[in-house]
Image (tube, rainbow, N blue to C red):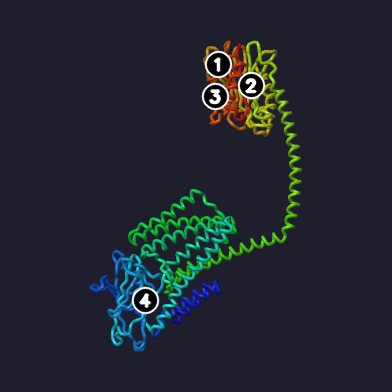
């Protein structure tokens, strides 16, 4: 037992004494494996040769087999399910003839019976119809002295039940009872006792974490990690099952037991592992993703229970592992993203999981380069160190919290006084700031009122009734200062033209632009009255751009030049006016040119203005308006629209201009049902007398 003892001592030194010495453990393990293979003890009968197997008890058809195949006995059966018998022979050396002998068979899956010279020796597990294994607990049996042929050849037969999985130890041996019991104790320590102890420890740790979550529900990572360790402890039941003093299979056979512990419990453990990663990083699940996670967990947990055979069960279980792996990949991506942002918690998370990650790497190296049987135990210890790391982090967090609470309690009066002074200073600053803001608000309101008063004086039309024309209008600004502009161009009580414009934006800026462009348009109109109206509009555009400089506001509009009973109109991106004839014919005044485009006041954009001449007879009229009219909304968010405006004009075309204006305004507000007006409203009616 020299080299088994070396391995055990090295392993416990690594895990419990110096966690940084995994490499030393690996070197010792390699040495013990290489050196140990060539150093066999004289008092042990190693059953390495002359093995055969058969699928029938009478060994009618007998096939040679090497012990290395004992880990995969199910591969020897076509259906991977059934009984298989293995047989070998041995002789008893002189040094053991006078001793009480025992046979060591190690871990068995699923069940086995042992016979020597056709005499029953012992059973591990149970056979169908209620097949069940004995966990990872190794088996050994005392051999009655009277059944042995001490001077000749003895025959060993092992009957094994396999169902997709099936194994016996590939190093069976016979020796005196004391030696075999020592071998069993050492191997049982690694394969079953230690996992059993760890499962109990994990269970207690889970209760501690859940208790911390109970007293501090805001920290969800305590709940997810508590449940992760809780289900991890139950997952270890599949390894340490043989150590429990009471039956844990609850009457289940091997297949049902695997469905519960090796499948469902494993998937729930993985689910909470992903939950813990996200909770620890304070990342909230989107409801849709959380729904997908829960549904996928239910599917992979429930579907394997419908498997009738172990082969189907393992197939479904591995599909479930693939689905669970997808969620793990998403968590890895999340960790990488947090690391890129230098998230301290992501670094802490990696440090916490480093023991189990390193143990996975170490177990892989040991599996491929040594004959050490307990690589799974290395992973279990790595997970144990991860649990301890996070437990230390949790305790450290609570120590800091309690230290902070203690500091606050001992310095409460001082802290309150300091905070009170800070609040008084903050309140004083806020009062001063509020006073300044209130003063600025009053100043702004006064300035807006003044601007509105100035604008109103600009907008007032002193005369709206002329020899041949009658004009009526309605104007309602959205704010104190309007961005709509309307004007009548008259000379000696004779109407020469009409203009309506809409400046982009709202508030003081657009209001100031209206007063700026009003004078420019007025001057350019009369200066170019005898010129082509299109050329006049182009000049207006140039002058406005020049005068307003870098101000971004632009304007749409219509300008009309009147001569006798004819009006010439240029539309610069404005809503189409409506023409109503005295005979009741009503229509929109469309573009003079289909290629016509552009607005006024923007540089470096294509412009093409065109004019349209319309002859008006007695009783004919034109309705001009801004988009504030057509874009009023009702309670259902529907627009008033140009079509409704046209229809009300069509139905009431014979009304006087003032009455028709009042009717349209009334219909506008009735449609809006006292909804808040969000744009300036301007409406003008020009009627031929």
Q: CA distance from mark 4 to mark 1?
A: 108 Å
Q: Residue at x 23, y 73 (%)?
A: 60
Q: Is residue 204 left or right of residue 243?
A: right
Give the residue at x 43% y 56%.
323
How far apart are the alpha carbons under marks 3 and 1?
16 Å
Which is more N-terminal, label 1 or label 4?
4
Q: CA distance from mark 2 to mark 1?
A: 17 Å
Q: Position of residue 440 (x, y in %)?
A: 74, 37
Judging by the rendered image, the residue that carries numbered circle 2 is 474
Q: Earlier in the sequence, mark 4 or mark 3?
A: 4
- What element does badge 3 sit on? helix
Horizontal relation, residue 487 to residue 361: left or right: right
Labelled pair 3, 1 in contact (Cβ < 8 Å)? no
Whichever of labels 3 and 1 marks the residue nearer the N terminus, that label is 3
Decide: few, some or many residues near mark 1? Use Cα within 10 Å; few <14, some 14-19, many ≥20.
some
Q: Which residue is mark 1?
A: 652
**Mark 3 highlights which residue?**
642
> Which mark is first along the chain, 4 or 2?
4
Q: Which mark is residue 105?
A: 4
Quadrant for residue 20, please give it: bottom right
**Quarter holding the N terminus?**
bottom left
């Amino acid at each position: 037992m020299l080299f088994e003892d070396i391995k055990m001592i090295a392993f416990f030194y690594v895990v419990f004494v110096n966690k940084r010495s995994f490499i030393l453990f690996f070197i010792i393990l390699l040495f013990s494996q290489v050196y140990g293979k060539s150093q066999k003890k004289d008092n042990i009968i190693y059953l390495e040769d002359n093995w055969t197997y058969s699928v029938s008890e009478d060994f009618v058809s007998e096939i040679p087999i090497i012990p290395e195949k004992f880990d995969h006995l199910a591969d020897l059966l076509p259906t991977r399910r059934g009984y298989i018998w293995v047989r070998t022979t041995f002789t008893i050396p002189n040094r053991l003839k006078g001793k009480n002998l025992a046979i060591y068979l190690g871990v068995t899956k699923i069940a086995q019976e042992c016979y020597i010279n056709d005499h029953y020796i012992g059973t591990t597990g149970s056979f169908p119809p209620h097949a069940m294994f004995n966990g990872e607990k190794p088996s050994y049996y005392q051999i009655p002295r009277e059944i042995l042929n001490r001077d000749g050849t003895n025959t060993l037969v092992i009957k094994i039940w396999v169902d997709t999985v099936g194994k016996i130890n590939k190093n069976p041996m016979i020796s005196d009872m004391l030696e075999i019991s020592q071998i069993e104790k050492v191997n049982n320590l690694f394969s079953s006792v230690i996992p059993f102890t760890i499962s109990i420890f994990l269970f207690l740790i889970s209760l501690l974490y859940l208790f911390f979550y109970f007293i501090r529900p805001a920290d969800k990572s305590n709940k997810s990690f508590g449940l992760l360790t809780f289900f991890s402890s139950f997952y270890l039941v599949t390894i340490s099952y043989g150590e429990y003093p009471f039956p844990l299979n609850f009457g289940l056979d091997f297949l049902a037991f695997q469905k519960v512990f090796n499948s469902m419990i494993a998937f729930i453990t993985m689910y909470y592992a992903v939950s813990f990663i996200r909770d620890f990083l304070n990342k909230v699940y989107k409801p849709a993703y959380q729904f997908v996670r829960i549904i996928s967990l239910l599917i992979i947990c429930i579907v394997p229970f419908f498997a009738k055979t172990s082969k189907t069960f393992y197939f479904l279980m591995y599909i479930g592992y693939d689905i669970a792996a997808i969620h793990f990949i998403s968590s890895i991506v999340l960790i990488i993203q947090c690391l890129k942002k230098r998230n301290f918690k992501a670094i802490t998370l990696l440090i916490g999981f480093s023991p189990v990650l390193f143990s996975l790497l170490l177990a892989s190296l040991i599996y491929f380069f040594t004959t050490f049987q307990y690589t799974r135990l290395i992973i279990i210890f790595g997970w144990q160190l991860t649990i301890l790391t996070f437990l230390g982090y949790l305790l450290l967090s609570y120590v800091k919290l309690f230290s902070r609470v203690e500091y606050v309690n001992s310095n409460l009066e001082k802290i309150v006084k300091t905070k009170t002074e800070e609040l008084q200073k903050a309140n004083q600053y806020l009062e001063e700031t509020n006073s300044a803001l209130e003063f600025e608000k009053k100043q702004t309101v006064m300035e807006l009122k003044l601007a509105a008063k100035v604008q109103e004086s600009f907008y007032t039309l002193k005369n709206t009734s002329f020899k041949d024309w009658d004009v009526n209008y309605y104007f309602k600004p959205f704010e104190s200062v309007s961005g709509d502009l309307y004007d009548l161009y008259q000379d000696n009580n004779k109407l020469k033209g009409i203009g309506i414009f809409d400046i982009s934006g709202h508030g003081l800026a657009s209001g100031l632009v209206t007063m700026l462009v009003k004078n420019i348009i007025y001057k350019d109109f009369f200066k170019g009255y005898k010129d082509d109206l299109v050329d006049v509009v182009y000049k207006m555009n140039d002058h406005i751009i020049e005068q307003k400089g870098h101000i971004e506001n632009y304007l749409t509009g219509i300008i009309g030049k009147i001569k006798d009973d004819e009006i010439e109109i240029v539309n610069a991106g404005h809503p189409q006016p409506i023409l109503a004839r005295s005979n009741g014919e009503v229509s929109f005044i469309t573009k003079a040119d289909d290629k016509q485009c552009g607005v006024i006041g923007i540089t470096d954009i294509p412009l093409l203005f065109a004019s349209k001449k319309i002859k008006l007879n007695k009783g004919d009229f034109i309705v001009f308006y801004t988009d504030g009219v057509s874009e009023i909304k009702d309670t259902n968010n529907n627009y008033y629209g140009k079509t409704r405006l046209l229809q009300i004009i069509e139905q009431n075309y014979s009304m006087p201009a003032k009455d028709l204006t009042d009717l349209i305004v009334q219909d506008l507000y009735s449609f809006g049902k006292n909804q808040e007006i969000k744009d300036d409203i301007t409406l003008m009616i020009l009627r031929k007398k």
